[in-house]
Amino acid sequence: MARDDIRIFDTTLRDGEQAPGCSMTLREKLRVARALAELNVDIIEAGFPAASPGDFESVKAIADEDLGPVICGLARCNPEDIEKVHAAVRGASRHRIHVFVATSAIHREHKLRMAKEEIIKSAVGAISMARELCDDVEFSPEDASRTELAYLAEVVTAAIEAGATTVNIPDTVGYTVPAEFDELFRYLKAHVPGIDDITLSVHCHDDLGMAVANSLAAVRAGARQVECTINGIGERAGNCSLEEIVMALATRAEFFGAGTGIETTRLYPTSRLVSSITGMHVPRNKAIVGENAFAHEAGIHQHGMLQHASTYEIMRPEDVGLSRSNLVLGKHSGRHAFRDRVRELGFELDDFETNSAFLEFKKLADKKKDVYDSDIEAIIMSSDATSPGPWVLKSWRVETGTDRDATAHVELIGENQQTTTATADGDGPVAASFLALEQATGIDLELKKFEVHSVSVGEDAQGEVTVTVSHDGSDYRGHGTSVDIVEAGSRAYLEVINRVLRRRDRGARRPTPPTRATI
């Protein structure tokens, strides 16, 4: 890789998943990992294997698929963590062990209770052990941006001498600002022997809204790897946004003199996938992938756009995978037109997936006049994400009014074609439907969050519902889409019930609470 190329290190599956409400199942993590491989990221940080047995299994499953990018796992500076990372990632032909330890005075005093020399000894020992297992080892001094410069240079020097091939400089709490971060990187470049022989990396959080700006400052100062997440999800205010850093480098290539190998036309589909899986909806005004990113309403802007797109657009929507045409399909549209539209939107489906999505499209087209791109995206996400049985919602109806409780009746069909029905009352149509589903399946859930997002436009727009529920000490998340919000919510609720039942059938143990790691 040329020195002017920037490696993209995606940590959506590790740091991104640590955001409250963003935990993913193994199947969901595999879907995201495959999408990241199609996006052509250089490194996928697949998780923190020591956090829990489930995290270990998900990292191992991703590594064993050998998707192409380097597969990385995070470890603290102790032998058990390092051995677990190696065992999890070694199935990938290219793999990395990423070790970290905090270095700032506040962490040394209040968290680690370790002296400076002890921290360096711990880092050196961990890196040396990791190098015995793997040729590709990354080291991160946690909270580097609040670490004394001279001591940080001492730590980085020791890490390089111990065998680290990548050294990452994290702004763990989103504290720094671009000019200050630029000075930090230039100081390290000037004071650390051998720093030009390794890859210098940057990892920024967005607590002050400057994660992308700080990462770009680091690139200008010599960083050649940027750690980021899809949609900028992550701890607290999130991480540096992958799509923003990539398109900033692409759009201002003459200024930065650096670029990435990212397949930018996959940015929008990947953003939608992660949003659908995590339930973290992308704000309309989000840069690059938000609904308004390429929308123009002001008259003077529209006039300029009609004359030449570059008057008010510095990027083409097609460059990020967002189609400008927004071709409208309807109930008379055929399978061929549907398949072509799916491909234009950036999705590659096999014959089975295409047929399944087409059937859902026809059902939707019978309910609404026009089917937009966003409707098709929702169908694909829902049909691919929906967990298999044992129960499928065959039919439902709700009766409600201002002077009475709502009454819901549901009919479910099982894997062996058996049916079950239930009727329940509630203080609203959603509550009644959820209670009827619980009675029909024998599963009691505690609803914690009910979120509704409009998928498309118009009075017959689809609604996307995300529910977060608790059962037996564990949290689950389900998704559903429909032109009827109650139906969408019912499908999301049933998805969770199915997951609980499948887990019960497997006799799975309650997962070990994950260990948090923020760098």
Image (spheres, rainbow, N blue to C red):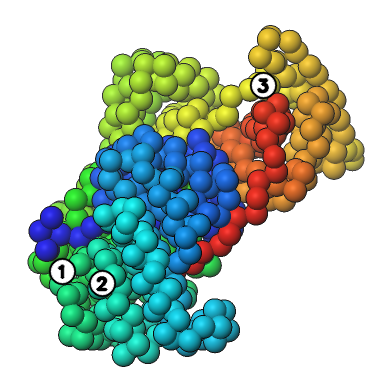
User: Which residue is at the front of the view, 100 or 383?
Assistant: 100
Question: What distance separates the C-alpha of mark 2 from that of mark 3?
Answer: 53 Å
User: Which residue is at the front of the view, 125 or 153?
Assistant: 125
Badge number at residue 357 = none
Comes first in the chain, label 2 or label 3: 2
Which amino acid type corresponds to the residue marked 1 in the rendered image? Asp
Quadrant of the snapshot with the N terminus:
bottom left
Badge number at residue 160 = 2
**Can you identify the residue that label 1 sits on?**
197
Residue 465 vs residue 173: left or right? Answer: right
Which amino acid type corresponds to the residue marked 2 in the rendered image? Ile
Circle 3 crowding by C-alpha within 10 Å: few under 14, some 14–19, many from 20: some
Looking at the image, the residue that sits furthest to the right is 404
Which amino acid type corresponds to the residue marked 3 in the rendered image? Pro
Q: Position of residue 61 (x, y in %)?
A: 44, 37
Q: Is 68 rendered above or below residue 363? A: below
Name the image quarter holding residue 513.
bottom right
Q: Are marks 2 and 3 in contact (CB under 8 Å)?
A: no
Q: Is residue 170 visible?
A: no
Question: What distance separates the C-alpha of mark 2 from that of mark 1?
Answer: 9 Å
Q: Is 433 rendered above or below residue 192? A: above
Comes first in the chain, label 2 or label 1: 2
Q: Residue at x 40, y 66 (%)?
A: 126
Circle 2 crowding by C-alpha within 10 Å: few under 14, some 14–19, many from 20: many
Residue 308 vs residue 446: left or right? Answer: left
Q: Is residue 6 visible?
A: yes
Q: Position of residue 347 (x, y in %)?
A: 33, 32
Name the image quarter holding residue 152.
bottom left
**Can you identify the residue that label 3 sits on?**
390
Q: Are marks 2 and 1 in contact (CB under 8 Å)?
A: yes
